[in-house]
Amino acid sequence: MPESLLQLKNISYSYHSLQTETPALYQISFHIDVGEFVAIVGPSGCGKSTLLSIIAGLLSPEEGTIVFHNPDGSLSYPKIGYMLQRDHLFEWRSVYQNAILGLEINKKLTQENIDRVLTLMKDYDLYRFKDKKPSELSGGMKQRAALIRTLALNPQLLLLDEPFSALDYQTRLTVSADICNIIRKSGKTALLITHDLSEAISLADRVIILSKRPATVKCEVPIRLTLPDDSSLAARNAPEFQYYFNLLWEALSDEKK
Ligand code: ADP
């Protein structure tokens, strides 16, 4: 049995103002196993970002609990890395200085951590650009630099909030496959929010479909693809791909009615 890193139990959340209440999440329960890559898909405005904010500890659920199972057996909050739609690299710092920013802020700029960042930069073809400014990189390279900055802190859980949505379609295909490869090779557990069904099927081990707001878990679909190689397009050409696409499309279409 794989071990769960994270378990959400009946999480509900509403936004409140003086006049109104906006229910965003209703009784959400699911788990994520150690090393698993899970994608969440749902109609626009259903509560996906709210859910990530709750998992990241930025918002507290009104009802329900989140349980983390750390490898050391403790139930303390794990280290979480958050990757957003924009890379948020600072133009006044070099690519390398951006990559070590989190280490600097957290006072963890040890030789071991610096070496890990440099190795990641070498492995993912950023080392030769390390003294460049972010504006001199392509969109895909910037996202790789942002991911390395996130991985530098060695998070146990990566939260990815539509990290490819600012890229054009062609770039998005290769960058999403690249980023997914980096995450898998590093053995990290990841939760991806996307509105792109093909992206979810090609990257994730399991897709969770949310209903319209207030979001509930409509269904969970484990993805098993027959892959001839690990090229970025292999998943999209897998014989099972269309089956999963139709399944998820129907589940989502019901929600958009
Ligand atoms: P998604 O990420 O699925 O697009 P969000 O989690 O951003 O959805 O938002 C869910 C719902 O909560 C939306 O209807 C949105 O308008 C509302 N919402 C989000 N943030 C706030 C806020 N700070 N105050 C009030 N309502 C909010």
Image: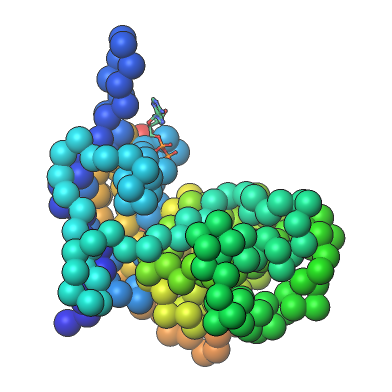
Total numbered badges shown on the rendered structure: 0
Please state the horizontal and vertical placement of residue 72, each as a whole percent of the image.
23, 77
Please state the horizontal and vertical placement of residue 135, each as a whole percent of the image.
81, 55
Q: Is residue 64 visible?
A: yes
The quarter of the rendering in which ligand 1 is drawn is top left
Q: Nearer the viewer, residue 56 or 255?
A: 56
Taking the spot 31% from the left edge, 9% from the top edge, the residue there is: 19
Is residue 256 positioned above or below 101 on the image? Answer: above
Taking the spot 52% from the left edge, 90% from the top edge, the residue there is: 228
Please state the horizontal and vertical placement of residue 217, each as a whole percent of the image.
24, 49
Q: How is the image coloured?
A: rainbow
Which quadrant is home to the N terminus? bottom left
Q: Nearer the viewer, residue 28 or 135?
A: 135
Q: Quadrant of residue 146?
A: bottom right
Which quadrant is home to the C terminus? top left
Please state the horizontal and vertical placement of residue 255, each as a whole percent of the image.
33, 40
Taking the spot 70% from the left edge, 63% from the top edge, the residue there is: 97
Q: Is residue 127 left or right of residue 186?
A: right
Q: Is residue 232 visible?
A: no
Q: Quadrant of residue 141?
A: bottom right
Is residue 66 positioned above or below 49 on the image? Answer: below
Q: Is residue 3 left or right of residue 52?
A: left
Is residue 117 positioned above or below 176 on the image? Answer: below
Residue at the farthest top position: 19
Taking the spot 40% from the left edge, 60% from the top edge, the residue there is: 80
